Amino acid sequence: MRFRQKLLIAGWLILAPFTTTACQNSPSESISTTPEPSQTIANTSQPSQTIVNTPITSQPKDYIGFQYENPEQIKDLEFLGGMVFLGGAVKNMQGGYAYMRQNGQNMLWLIGQKKPDSAGKIISEVLDILTFTEYDKELNNRTYHLSMGRCRLNGKSNSDVEVVAIVVLEPKEWLDKVKQAWRINRKTGNFEPTTNDNMICENPNIS
C-alpha cells in the first residue's frame, strides 16, 4: 500500500507520494564540492547564483550551488519526493533532501534552506549530489527503493535521518537487502559512504 507523506521543501507544503522506486550508485559517483582537476563544478565560494525556474546546466554535478524556491517548478526536472530534517542543521542551515530525475537520470540533492527573506520566501541551496548511473534502470522500473532518513541501524528503534540507502523492494515491512548507504556530514554539507551492516529500512508501500 502506498502512503503519502507531508514534505516541507523550500517553504512549500507538498503532499507527495514516496515512489516505490530506488537507486544505487558506487562511492565514485558521489559528487563532491571539492573539484578534481578534470571536473568543472559550481564554485560555491562565489556570490550566490540568480534564483531561476530553469536548470543552470544539464550535468548533475553542476547543480551544486543552485538555488531555488519550489522544486516542482524547476523546468525539465521531475521532483520525486524529499524531506526536511526536524531541527537538523547542515552548514548552519536547515537541512533536507530533494529526490530529482532528469531525462531518466536520478539524483539525490542534499539541500540547505536559508532563513526567510523580507518577503517571507525560503530559498534552498544544493550542497551536494548523489547520482545512480549504474542503477537507474532498477530505480526507474521500481524494483529498488531510495530510503531517505527511514533506516534503522544495529537494532535501534528510531530511524536515522542522516542516513540514505538503496534497498531491494520486497513484500515485507522492513527491508534488509541494503545495497549501499551514505551518511551526511553536517559540518561539510557532503554525502559520505557508510556501512550498511545491521541496517533495515522501512518499506514505503506497507503501512
Image: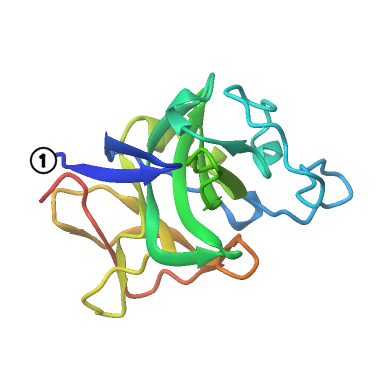
Picture colour scheme: rainbow
At a point 64% along the width and 31% down the height, the residue shown is: 51
Query: How many discs mark residues in the rendered view?
Result: 1
Q: Position of residue 157 (x, y in %)?
A: 21, 76
Q: Position of residue 111 (x, y in %)?
A: 53, 50
Q: Which residue is mark 1?
A: 1
Residues packed near mark 1 inside 10 Å, few (<14), some (14 to 19) or many (20 plus) = few
Can residue 159 be spotted in the picture?
Answer: yes
At a point 25% along the width and 44% down the height, the residue shown is: 6
Can residue 166 be spotted in the picture?
Answer: no
Horizontal relation, residue 191 to residue 99: left or right: right
Q: Position of residue 73 (x, y in %)?
A: 47, 24
At a point 77% along the width and 56% down the height, the residue shown is: 34
Disc 1 residue type? Answer: Met
Horizontal relation, residue 188 to residue 36: left or right: left
In the rendered image, the vertical position of residue 29 relative to residue 176, given as above or below: above
In the rendered image, the vertical position of residue 197 relative to residue 47, given as above or below: below
Q: Position of residue 156 (x, y in %)?
A: 25, 79
Horizontal relation, residue 143 to residue 59: left or right: left
In the rendered image, the vertical position of residue 4 relative to residue 55, given as above or below: below
Horizontal relation, residue 38 to residue 182: left or right: right
Residue closest to the eye, 9 or 30: 9
At a point 75% along the width and 49% down the height, the residue shown is: 44
Residue 18, image quadrant: top left
Q: Quadrant of the N terminus?
A: top left
Residue closest to the eye, 51 or 98: 51
Describe the element under mark 1 as helix, strand or loop. Answer: loop
Residue that extends furthest to the right in the rendered view of this protein: 37
